Amino acid sequence: QVQLVESGGGLVQPGGSLRLSCAASGRILSIDLMGWYRQAPGKQRDLVATITFDGTAKYADSVKGRFTISRDNAKNTVFLQMNSLRPEDTAVYYCNAPVINYFRGPYWGQGTQVTVSS
């Protein structure tokens, strides 16, 4: 059974940094697009960033220049480096993959809480 497992969330002061990781476990043959979403209390889940297998990245306007998505294909892992964090970045962050092993999902991780507060 394929699973996505996030780690790396926590509490950080405004202006600080965090690095999230998401590892796909199980028998993985192919994952093209992977991404991060976030959901703040009372709000919808929004796209933060995506990255293709060959490393092409896209970002939401709200995080451009502050967040960097990357991946290690050998380890089926995607990362989100978050710098210059703001209180409005506070949310549960979810890892996502629309398709794994040619089977359409979407596949979601369990989520990891990021809190930006002084």
Image: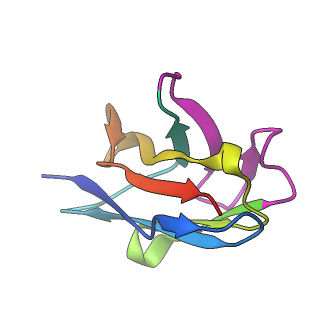
Relative to 16, 45 lies left or right = left
Q: Quadrant of the C terminus?
A: bottom right
Relative to 9, 16 lies left or right = right
Residue appearing at x 34%, y 42% in the figure = 108
- Residue 96 on the magenta span: no
Residue appearing at x 52%, y 35% in the figure = 40
Q: Quadrant of residue 23?
A: bottom left
Q: Main secondary structure of the magenta part?
A: loop
Question: Which residue occupies the extreme left position in the image?
Answer: 1
Q: Position of residue 100 (x, y in %)?
A: 34, 46
Q: Is residue 12 above or below residue 31?
A: below
Could you say which is closer to the camera, residue 61 or residue 76? Answer: 61
Query: How are the colours assigned in the image?
Result: rainbow
Total number of numbered discs in the rendering: 0
- Residue 52 on the magenta span: yes
Relative to 46, 95 lies left or right = left
Q: Quadrant of residue 3?
A: bottom left
Could you say which is closer to the camera, residue 39 or residue 81? Answer: 39
Q: Is residue 103 above or below residue 85?
A: above
Residue appearing at x 71%, y 72% in the figure = 16
Relative to 118, 62 lies left or right = right
Residue appearing at x 20%, y 62% in the figure = 27
Q: Position of residue 115 (x, y in %)?
A: 53, 56
Question: Which residue occupies the extreme right position in the image?
Answer: 65
Q: Position of residue 68 (x, y in %)?
A: 72, 63
Residue interval drawn in magenta: 42-66
Could you say which is closer to the camera, residue 107 or residue 9? Answer: 9
Could you say which is closer to the camera, residue 73 or residue 12? Answer: 12
